[in-house]
Image (tube, rainbow, N blue to C red):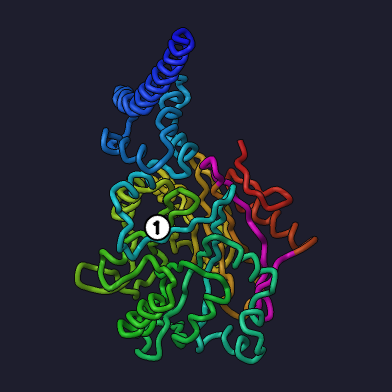
Amino acid sequence: MFKKIYIIIIIIAFIILTFVSRSYASELQEEKPEKTQENIINELLTYNLESPYIDENFLIWIEQNYHKQTLINLKNELKKNTYQIQTWHDLTGNSLQVLYDLYQNNYKEKNNIQIIDNNKEKSTINFVGDISLADNFDIMPYYDSRQEGVYGILSEEVVTTMQNADIMVANNEFTFSNRGTPLANKYYTFRGNPERVSIYHEMGVDLVSLANNHVYDFGEEAFLDTLETLDNANIARIGAGKNKQEAQKPYYYIINGYKVAFISATRAEKNILTPEATETQSGVFRCYNPEELISVISKTKQESDYVILLIHWGKEDSHNLEQVQIDTGKQYIDAGADLIVGSHAHVLQGMEYYNDKLIAYNLGDFIFNRENKDTGILSMNIHDDGTLSYQFIPCHQANYKTTLLYDENYSTTINNMNSWSINAILDDNGNILKTN
């Protein structure tokens, strides 16, 4: 009898000891990851990550906002000597720049940044050249008379291509207003009713450049109306403003975890009539002297993954480049621009790669006047791994309407672009490649 009781007591004691032992082990296991994370942070700080952003508090924030395994994976990449700046995006879905901005809460209440969460393998930014929606010029009477909305001036395929872009960019080559008087001594002046801004929504346009020679055609009143009209329509704008600071201010998009900055400037006028923005004067961002633009690009690059420069330059109605385009284009790339997209020549000009960065010298008129001419859509793809690729989509403006090109006309435009380009070549699908 006593033997049985003794055995039962031993069994109960064993069960209790086992339970206590497991509970204690569980507590140790819960404490271990915390110590491990602390050790990982200290270990990560011993590596030279060549970034002023990365300190203990930043790494703690990464741990708190992303899976704890992120820091372990980061350490492993460093140990294997496979770490690169792209590693942050690979591990978190955001670039180091975006992560630091989020850590600093830099996006709160800012009016020059937009976050697009598209979760795609690649993001697409499309660009077109000069657009005029001026009531006193060629296109808008046909928009009205055809009663087809945007499809009266753009083909369905063109509109679909524009609307499908994650970001659609155009050059706004006129002023939105019902006020003002034409600038003296100016032959062409373009003004459209502010209600016409809805056409940009029909096109899918997200951002416009105002650094050109027609945005101030009807004086300051009309110019200020243009700024207000675009702001009220939630169309982002760059390249002009109420003062110098506003005109030079970049506009940013966070797209698929990368920070993309847009800047715009002009050196288009041979007889300069459009006012330059100053500390106290409204106007455009000029770059006849490139030094100030170089400074803006350099500062913007320090806080961006990609910088895109939209520039108004070149000789009108000529496929030939001016030497100043070639020279300053390279300076802007050296300063930090990742892509340069030109307008103003009214016709297409060639392309060039410099330090593996693309310069598209001129996209010509997109939907502008009565002339028959080739034009096109430049498509920039930001892939999930951070690489960039480009495609040119040939179009043609005729009979006050822009359409896609096909067959022989498509091939002719591709061949022409190749003949005008320096070390870039367009393949049969319009993909823009670098030649040796």
Asked if residue 45 lies left or right of residue 124, the reply is left
Looking at the rendering, which quadrant does residue 25 occupy?
top left
Q: Residue furthest top?
A: 3
User: Could you tell me residue 272's position as x and y percent?
Assistant: 35, 71
Q: Give the residue drawn at x 66%, y 85%.
A: 148
Is most of the magenta stretch helix, strand or loop? strand
Which amino acid is tagged 1? Tyr
* Residue that appears at 33% across and 63% down: 286
In the rendered structure, does residue 388 fall within the stretch colored magenta?
A: yes
Question: Vertically, is 400 above or below 32?
Answer: below
Residue 402 visible in rendering:
yes
Sort mark 1 into few (<14), some (14-19) or many (20+) by Cα contacts within 10 Å: many
Determine whether 345 is above or below 86 in the image. Answer: below
Residue linked to disc 1? 252
Q: Of residues 262 and 322, which is closer to you in this image?
A: 262
Residue pictured at 63% horizontal, 56% vertical:
392
Q: Which residues are magenta?
A: 383-405
**Can residue 183 be seen by looking at this rendering?**
no
User: In this orientation, which residue lies closer to the viewer: 254 or 296?
Assistant: 254
